Amino acid sequence: MTRSLGKVWEMVTDPLEDLRWLWRLRTFELTIRELRLDGRVVGSVHLGVGQEAIAVGAVSALGPADPVFATYRGHNWALACGVPSEALFAELMGRASGINGGRGGSAYFSAPAYRFYGENSIVGAGTPHAVGAALAGVYDGSNRVSLTVFGDGAMNQGGVHESMNLAAARNLPVIFLCENNYWSEMTPITETTRDPELYKRAAAYGIHGERIDGNSVQEVRSAVGRAVERGRNGGGPTLIEAMTARLVGHYIGDVEHYRRPGELDAAKAAEPIVRLREELLRNGIPEETLDAIEDEVTRETQAAAERAAASEPASPATVKEHLYA
């Protein structure tokens, strides 16, 4: 349920269902990592292990017609939007049954039927697309809110700032969601900007900005819910900085020599699944119930990957089809 603009935004939620979604995204990413390492997935792959709560919380606060524009670290977002894991596995394995017929791979797939308008290997390039979708929504009367997600490194891209400026100037319903995992590829955000509290940049555009705990599904859901309500009711765009950590390298094959001593251990102790499990245990949910959810989701994910692997590879004879210039 929602309350009117200016009041606390709430949604009736099921923490066990949140845990199930977190595990669904996590097991997909871990399986993709195995498939990439053994050669069944090829090409550039960037995983969102540890950042699942942002996608789960944000998408659950959007309406069914509100579009999502992700970065190249977008598997979590596609799954949260409802893209079937088997179709996504097939896409990354170059199968004809993939969500884009095996043509997009990890970095370029799109699923508009699920209001997921794709990844983009240009840093921050989803932001102008999201602004365009919001502007179109003003003219077609749909009153949709568009969400664009990007990393902390993208906050220094000119296109991101131009997008925020246009959204602010036209008072468009856009949610700019920054997944701040402290690393701009292999460089800490503290070395690329004078003030690492990135949400403060919203003030320069006269829009609302806030920093939240990106490892809490409920906190993300509440913040995005307020932003949706603000945008849909004429309050304009919002910048949300969601603090999180990636538990893997920037890409598969990253040796992570840049990690500080103890950093990864601290991140693993505070990651979304560990935290939600601990919360549920404190609230009296039996550990067996939580383990059963993990086992069930793991089996479902493995079965989806096996079905995708057994499907027909995309035909090289069609490589010149669906090309536009």
Image: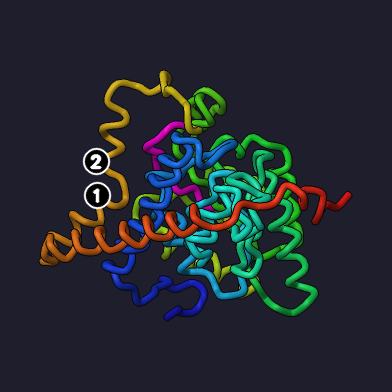
- Residue sitting at x 27%, y 34%: 266
Q: Quadrant of residue 138?
A: bottom right
Q: How is the image coloured?
A: rainbow
| CB contact under 8 Å: marks 2 and 1 | yes
Residue reaching furthest to the top: 257
Judge left or right: residue 267 versus residue 145: left
- Residue sitting at x 67%, y 76%: 143
Which dot marks residue 274? 1
Label 2 sits on what residue type?
Ala
Label 1 sits on what residue type?
Val
Q: Quadrant of residue 299?
A: bottom left
Q: Is residue 106 visible?
A: yes
Q: Nearer the viewer, residue 103 or 27?
A: 103
- Magenta segment range? 239-249
Judge left or right: residue 224 versus residue 100: left
Residue reaching furthest to the right: 325
* Residue, disc 2: 269
- Residue sitting at x 44%, y 73%: 7
Element marked by disc 1: helix
